[in-house]
Image: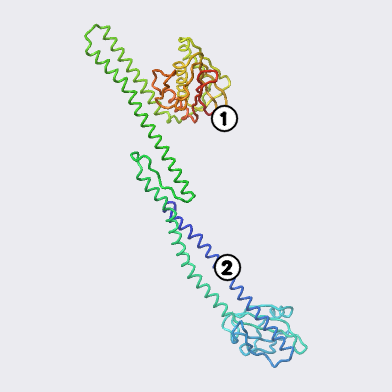
Amino acid sequence: MSRLPVRLRLTLAFAGVMAVVLGAVGAFLYLRLEADLDESIDQGLRSRASDTAALLGQGGAGLRSDSDPLVESEESFAQVLTPSGAVVDSTPQLGTEPVLGATDLARARREPAFFEREGLRGVEATARLLAAPAERAGRTAIVVVGSSLEDRDDALASLASLLLIGGPAALLLASLAAYWLAAAALRPVEAMRSRAADISAHSPGERLPVPAATDELQRLGTTLNAMLGRLEEALARERRFVDDASHELRTPLALHRAELEVALEYEGGEVELRGAIASAIEEVDKLTALAEDLLVLARAGDRAERAAVPVWPLLTRLAERLGPAAEKEGRRLMVDADRAGSVRADAAGLERALTNLVDNALRHGGGAIEVSARRDGEAVELHVRDEGPGFPRDFLPRAFERFSRADTARAGTGTGLGLAITAALAEAYGGRAMAANRPEGGADVWLELPRA
């Protein structure tokens, strides 16, 4: 069933429901008509029984086949019995054989009662009888009137035939209409699919057609168009990233080539030659560092394995490793995370992200550097604060973009990937990276990570 096309599945589901509805309606009509016909026949029998009892009370000449508006005269019959069951009078087709047995006769002596009989003399179809007590010449008698159910059975059979023929025909027509409606309802989906097949990276700005009706398909088209917009933005960012990476690589490669050419053509002493080679090695180191940063940035989203990382030991190791560098520049590196608990992350990646933040503060900030952690609900914030000039106001919105650099006090010789790597790692751990300027001066950059 799940492998069938959607429109066929919708049609089959509709056909199943429609079959149940048609069956229920047909059964209701059949039973309703049967009840109405039975009520009409019973009403006619009551009327005939009342007329027959009146004739007996008046001392009439005998039973005869009176006309009845509900049944044909030849299908009506009557019989008068004594309380013991002997036939006193009868219509011609019944003869002198009583139509009631002893049990039915006893019931009829107490109250009027209805019976159905088959095989009565002179009556081919099933007959419905009404037996009721009456007075005849000062004595109690049992008046029995009856009518054939042939007309009723014929009417019910005709209705059943119509239902059996018309029901499947109506079901077929309804199913065809349902298939057409399903195809019409899915036409916007096919239009979106056709347009989506033509959209590629070489056709920016293309969007899926959205139906005018405010329904699920319109919301689907709007959502997919929004997704296409996000993909275009991501593709544009990747293209800018490639362009920026090419630009960043071009300069050290050109310098490296120049150093090698100088070393190749240099005719001076060994000291000068070694200096040229050392300069070339320095450029190689820069290229290696840049390549490593690019690799970390590209693989940041693949760090799916996360575990509980205690914050205090992590920050202690960070201070032991980077403290000497801070002291060398006459600055202090302080840690405050005694009650921070643990976060869900990768220890090595998180240490690298915090190292980037501290290194950024050492390069571009001033004064003491404080690395702290505090709980905030189900998250832990890891802050790196300094006392320098802070971020330029127009640089804050793009501080975590790749290859972004401030143009004023925070400009430096870095590649502009440190904060981008930090943000990518934070997102890979289910958190985020943020930056702000402190009111008292300096920058505050922090990671918000889920608490373990």
- The image shows residue 54 at horizontal and vertical percentages of 72, 87
Image position of 416 (left or right of 44): left
Mark 2 crowdedness (10 Å alpha carbons): few <14, some 14-19, many ≥20:
few
The quadrant of the picture occupied by the C terminus is: top right
2 vs 1, front mark: 1
Q: Which residue is mark 1?
A: 378
Question: Which residue appears at 46% of the width and 46% of the height?
Answer: 220
Q: Which residue is found at the position 47% from the left and 64% from the top? A: 171
Q: Three-letter amino acid code at disc 2?
A: Phe
Relative height, residue 238 to residue 222 (above, below): above
Label 1: state its secondary structure. Answer: loop
Q: Quadrant of residue 414?
A: top left
Q: What residue is at 26 percent from the left and 9 percent from the top? A: 273
* Nearer to us in this view, 350 or 181: 181
Circle 2: element type: helix
The disc at residue 137 is none
Residue 119, position in %: x, y? 59, 82
Which of the two labelled residues, at mark 2 and mark 1, occupies the earlier sequence position? Answer: 2
In the rendered structure, which amino acid carries the disc numbered 1?
A: Glu
- Residue identified by numbered label 2: 28
Q: Is residue 229 above or below residue 178?
A: above
Residue closer to the observer: 306 or 224: 224
Report crowding for label 1: few under 14, some 14 to 19, many 20 or more residues within 10 A (C-alpha): few
CA–CA distance in space, label 2 to label 1: 61 Å
Residue 256 pos. (x, y %): 29, 17
The image position of residue 216, as x and y in percent, is 48, 49
